């Protein structure tokens, strides 16, 4: 088990509902997909996610609403900037699940 954190540290994590507008493979990467995500901000955000093996047809992601961490420092991978992190679950047996909120929750809604 990892070290426990207090509620003040956890409260710093911004978890936001976003709608995936596009998903594409990244040449040269076996793990990453490039997602463009609508958070009802001025423009969509580019988020790189290591979920490629779970989505042989990445287009199935388009239109899905998922939860993302939206206040991480940008990170450069494969020469591209990622501006957030997708929430997902996986286990050693290869089971995988996106964290998808109820469809009635609009993009840009923050977890409380």
Image (cartoon, rainbow, N blue to C red):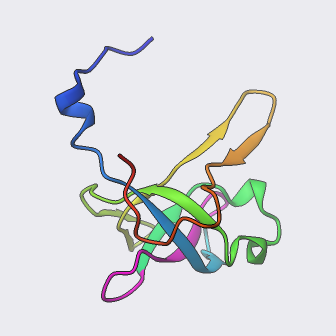
> Which is the main secondary structure of the residues drawn in magenta?
loop
Residue positioned most to the left: 8
Residue 109 is inside the magenta segment: no
Q: Is residue 42 magenta?
A: yes
Q: What residue is shown at x 28% (from left), y 63% (from top)? A: 74
Q: Position of residue 14 (x, y in %)?
A: 31, 52
Q: Is residue 83 above or below residue 6?
A: below
Q: Which residues are magenta?
A: 29-44
Q: Quadrant of residue 40?
A: bottom left
Q: Nearer the viewer, residue 13 or 3?
A: 13
Q: Nearer the viewer, residue 18 or 57?
A: 18
Tell me the quarter of the picture where residue 42 sits: bottom left
| Residue 29 image offset from top left, x and y in percent | 61, 65
From what the image shows, is residue 16 above or below residue 45? Answer: above
Instruction: Tell me if 92 is positioned left or right of 50 in this view.
Output: right
Residue that extends furthest to the bottom in the rendered view of this protein:
42
Residue drawn at x 63%, y 39% as measured from the top left? 89
Q: Toward the viewer: 97 or 23? A: 97
Q: Quadrant of the N terminus?
A: top left
Residue 17, x across and y down, in percent: 48, 62
Q: How many marks?
A: 0
**Vertical position of residue 110 compared to residue 9: above or below:** below
Where's residue 2, x and y in %? 39, 15
Q: Is residue 11 left or right of residue 54?
A: left
Horizontal relation, residue 47 to residue 20: left or right: left
Residue sitting at x 33%, y 81%: 41
Q: Residue at x 65, y 55 (%)?
A: 51
């Amino acid at each position: 088990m990892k070290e426990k954190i207090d509620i003040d540290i956890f409260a710093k994590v911004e978890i936001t509902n976003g709608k995936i507008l596009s998903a594409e493979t990244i040449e040269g990467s076996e793990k990453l997909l490039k997602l463009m995500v609508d958070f009802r901000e001025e423009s969509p955000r580019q988020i790189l996610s290591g979920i490629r093996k779970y989505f042989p047809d990445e287009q199935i992601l388009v239109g899905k609403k998922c939860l993302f961490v939206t206040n991480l420092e940008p990170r450069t991978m494969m020469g591209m900037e990622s501006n957030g992190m997708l929430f997902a679950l996986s286990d050693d047996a290869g089971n995988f699940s996106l964290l998808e909120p109820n469809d009635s929750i609009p993009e840009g809604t923050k977890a409380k």
